[in-house]
Amino acid sequence: MQDFEHEAQAFAAQIEEELREGRLSFPTALDVSLRIKRLADNPETTLEEIAAVVRAEPVLSAKAVRMANSVLLSPYGPQITTVGDAVRRIGLSALRCLAYAVAAEQLAQDQRSQKMRLLASGLWMHSIDVAAWSHAIARHLGAVKPDTAMLAGMMVDIGQFFLLARAADYPALEENMERFAEFVSTWDQPMGRAVLEAFELPDTILDAFQYENPYGGGWPPQDLSDVVFLAGLAAETPNPFDTLLGVHPRALLETCTAGIDRAKFDELLTAARNGREELLAALVH
């Protein structure tokens, strides 16, 4: 247990230094995601240039084509067979989300220990589930762009994922997974905010993560923050860190959403479920 304490202190010191200096050390798996993001932000970049980056990543290429051919995005369109056509059909916002999903999946698979790999895989699936619900709820309500909601939902666990990826350098932390979960919960918000800012995401997405001002229960949900919060409650794949800490978001539904008519909330989930399942299939398989 002394090794745990020593490495936890060392990890915390490293995090503090990086946050203080504004210099985060990103895992290499996020390189493609960051490249696509920067290209998409440049108005002079062509879709063909972005497609060329996608083609260099086989898994991303396959998932882009599969997403473009999903019933959700193309119920009546012709079958897509090329990466270039896939990028045009799904759009840059969805492509950013898909690139991050692939990077997060690779991070989960790169974990050296079985314990950490299972934790990372569970966290990845939770992020995908929240993203799919965010897209489906936004699409049903019409108050927020679905692609924007999907990207925001995908980023809901970014601080935890980043900490988990970096924890590979501190193997003693897996000696006590419950205490490691407590460590992650302490640093989740500041690290998550720092990563989102490093990604230079739009303020509309950054503002969706106002941890100090949770959803107040108004109906219908009016902004991105509300949509992502509700998607987190609806997610059927648990966040593994919540499980380790004994936190069950679905059980907190009554407390967190006291102002919501449960019948209306259940009606929303029922209406959004098909869209969620379609997008989930496109992101995961």
Image (cartoon, helix red, strand yellow):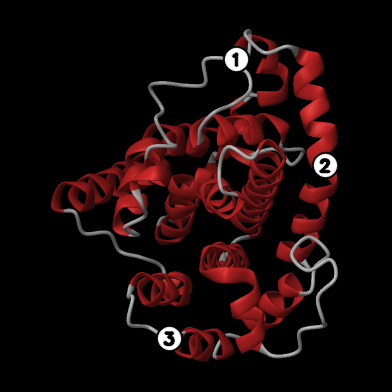
* Circle 3/circle 2 CB separation < 8 Å: no
Give residue 72's position: percent from left, percent from top: 78, 60
Question: Quadrant location of residue 102?
Answer: bottom right
Measured as percent of width and height from the top left, residue 74 is found at 78, 69
Q: Residue furthest left?
A: 21
How far apart, in angstroms, are the residues tagged by discs 3 and 1? Answer: 44 Å
Left or right: 160 with respect to 16? right
Please name the residue shown 61% across and 88% down the image.
84
Where residue 265 sits, quadrant-wise, is top right
Residue at x 81%, y 24% (from the top left corner): 266
The residue identified by callout 3 is 46
The image shows residue 145, relative to residue 229, as above or below, that is below
Are there few (<14), some (14-19), or many (20+) residues within 10 Å of tag 1? some
Mark 2 residue type: Arg
Judging depth in this view, the residue of 26 and 110 nearest the camera is 26
Position of the N terminus by quadrant: top left
Residue highlighted by disc 1: 256
Q: Nearer the viewer, mark 3 or mark 2?
A: 3
- Mark 2, residue position: 273
Callout 3 secondary element = loop
Residue type at tag 3 = Thr
Q: Nearer the viewer, residue 159 or 141?
A: 141
Residue 77 makes an appearance in the image: yes
217 lies above or below 44: above
Give the spatial CA distance, label 1 vs label 2. Answer: 21 Å
Q: Residues within 10 Å of mark 3 (few under 14, many from 20)?
A: few
Q: Residue 177: x, y in percent? A: 56, 40
